[in-house]
Amino acid sequence: MIRLMKNEILKLVKKKSFYIVTFIFILFCILTNIVYQSSFDTVQEESVDIEEITAQNEELDLEDNDDLLIYVENLTTLKMEELKEEYLGSSQEYLIEHFLYSTIYHMYEADYILDDDALKEEYSLALDEEIKRVAQDDWKSFALERVSYLEERVEESEGVEQERYQKLLDLALYRIENDVDYAEDNYLNEALLFLEENSFEYMNLLHDDDLSKEEESRLSFLEEEMTKREYILEHQQDILNDTTLRAVLINFPAEFGLFVLIYVIMIAGSIVSEEYTRGTIKYLFIKPFKRRTILTSKLLVVVLMIPLVMLFMSVIEIVLGGIQLGFSSLSVPVVLYVDGAITTYSVFGYLARLLLSSLPMYLLIGVLGFMISTITSSTSAAITISFLFYLLGNVISNLALVYDFPIFKGFVSLYWDFGYLVSHQAQPYGASIGQSILVISIYLLVMLCIAYVTFEKKDVKNI
Amino acid sequence: MSVLKVEKLCKKIRKKDILKDVSFEMNEGDILAFIGPNGAGKTTTIKCILGLQRISSGQVFINGYDIKKNFVHAIEKVGALVEEPDVYFYLSGLENLKMQARMYPHVVMDDISRIVELVGLEDRIHDKVSKYSLGMRQRLGIAIALLHSPNLLLLDEPTNGLDPEGIKDLRVLLKRLAKSGVAILISSHNLSELETFCNRVLIIAKGEILEESSIEEIKNMDENKYIVKVDNSNDCKPYLKDSDQIIDSHFIEVIRDEEEIAVFIRCLVMHDISLYEVKKESMSLEEAFMKRSGGDVDDSLDEK
């Protein structure tokens, strides 16, 4: 039996199609890595239309109080844009955005609304000084100012408001303690900013007893995102970076699942039928083995090859991805937010679980291809039907989410994906693990019975 | 105990009789020529013996084991080349042999190299089979059949694609194997190819065994045929028997035993017919056989 299996594996790996698919897979890996490498945050910052603001300002009636307020605001915006122009794309742009606004606003306010020249002069000097600090990229001084400002606020306020300021103060202190600058590519900075920007909204929603449906989902979204950011700050691990090898591996099933399918179908669909079409089945059948031993050895090879192919693909991607994107991200764990708590996996542990959870599906499709290959002796029929079955399975799974036809309940694709166990979710169709295993086992058993019976009885036709 | 015993083998496919009561036996050292036109059931018989096709009724015993009931033991000492030598084209000859050898428990590397030499493939054994000619693949097929030192060899048209040198080598090889006790069945649609070295002949047509006999038996049927060259065939007419034939204006064909031919020659000489040549023509196995079984050589054997 072992000897037969060794032969089968040799036949598989020496085949041209195996090399062709592997070659295409390698190319695909390289391209995928490039795509990941170049995927920057696609969040577009609101661009300010300077011309429109200028035009609006010319139409405003400065005698009118409301218009005057808008006028001052517009002037401030224009001034900000002018200053930012110089530092486009650098961390200084951020400093201007967040720390210069009030000084500039106060300056124009003194000039146009309060009509206080001395005050205006004071703010103007302050602005010059601040611009100087921006030029030196002295982010720490701004951060320290923020700390003392927040400390004052905490002192002054009480209750919920104090809680809010305390939270912001903690973040500001964290920044100074850990020396987190405002650079856009600093993941700690990204996490801090996210928390600073959203903690207010979060607190409000949290303390609101009467939430609408949308607000509720917004709250749980914020909860999840903020918990992850807090994890980042606590462990100083860049868990949200999606330009790393780690990110590619986490998305392995989505990116490379099709290739697993191709390998599995290619192997399972040809392993029996090709012996018939090549005529080599004669040599197999006149060896001192029972036919069912021969078929079993082939089946075992198919079953064995599924995890091996996954392993093989993972190794290729890890090596290629490591060369292209660096290996360092592999030490960062995968962090899942489940039911208000954080669960962490190592990258490899997570990948292994993901692949393991998809094994039943590939096994089923593999055995289907194997059966058709045995019945029809036609490789193309086996490959086509297996693919169609996979597609049909997906369609039915999707339909079953919407329509509750009892006929769908008997279809195996509702049960073959165990990915929900990895992400700690509920089975989408409410089936228990036992039920899923039962349905899958019945399908496997029926298909194998058909395959064995036909194989035992099949004549080797004359040419 | 006979090496191969086929008893009333019948094979039906969709109610059509492919084989009808095929029975024969082979002993150690037999070389059996299995002759029949295309579609007579040669390959089907071989496939049924090998268990490649199911037997509708009847029995096949190899070395005493029933192929249906005790397949593994029955097939253990059988080597076969059926139809084309279909091997894995994307592997080299040696890889193919190793793969086949792995399926027998006791075949070792030395056996493989010995057999490669035996079939004369040592120069090209590392090449991919896809680069082989049909003749070379045929040699590889024979090598596979011999790998595990079988005591029964079933060869289905083994001379296909072989050059005359190859056919000669094969004959020598098979004779040697037969001497060492291997029973060999060779199927062919061409008896003349086999007549020089087989010891028994089995003729099949339309799924039925027409004749089974030893080669001597058939050879004994051989009658004495003479070709006579004269200056004018028509002058001889009065002295010919009904069975004699005028081939053309110079040649005639007569059938006489030794006594009779002397009388015939004297008769021609006495009637002033110029006699240039008298040549004894021995009948081929094929013609002799067909004569005996009452068939016509052209119709039943040379359909190809």
Image (cartoon, coloured by chain):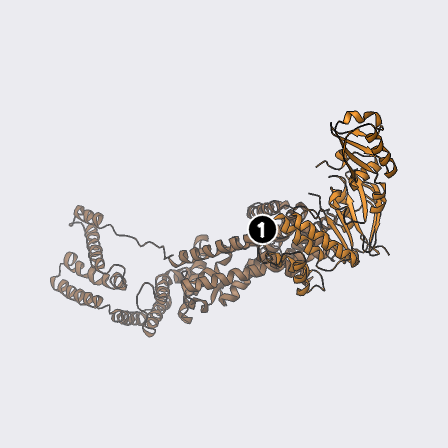
The residue closer to the viewer here, A86 or A267, is A267
Q: Can residue A434 be seen from the camera position used here?
A: no
Q: Residue at x 71, y 61 (%)?
A: B104
Q: Please state if A225 lies on the left or on the right of B114 as rendered.
A: left
Chain ID for brown: A
The one nearer the camera, B253 or B35, is B253
List x then y, in percent, for residue A119.
14, 64
The quadrant where residue A32 appears: bottom left
Look at the image and tell me in which quarter the C terminus of chain B lies: top right
Residue in the foreground of this view, choosing between A366 and A57: A366
Q: Which residue lies furthest to the right in this view?
A: B259
> In the image, what residue occupies the spot 16% across and 47% down?
A58
Q: How many marks?
A: 1
- Element carrying mark 1: helix
Query: In the image as oriented, which residue stretches furthest toward the left?
Result: A117
Residue type highlighted by circle 1: Ser
Q: Position of residue A197 (x, y in %)?
A: 35, 61
Question: Chain B shown in which color?
Answer: orange
Name which quarter of the figure residue A126 lies in: bottom left
Decide which of A23, B286 is in the foreground and name it: B286
Q: Residue A377 location, x and y as percent?
A: 66, 46
Chain letter of mark 1 equals: B
Say above or below: B243 vs B26: above
Q: From the viewer's perspective, is B215 left or right of B248?
A: right
The residue identified by callout 1 is: B130
Q: Compared with residue B132, is residue B229 higher up or lower down, i.e. above or below?
A: above
Snapshot quadrant of residue A463? top right
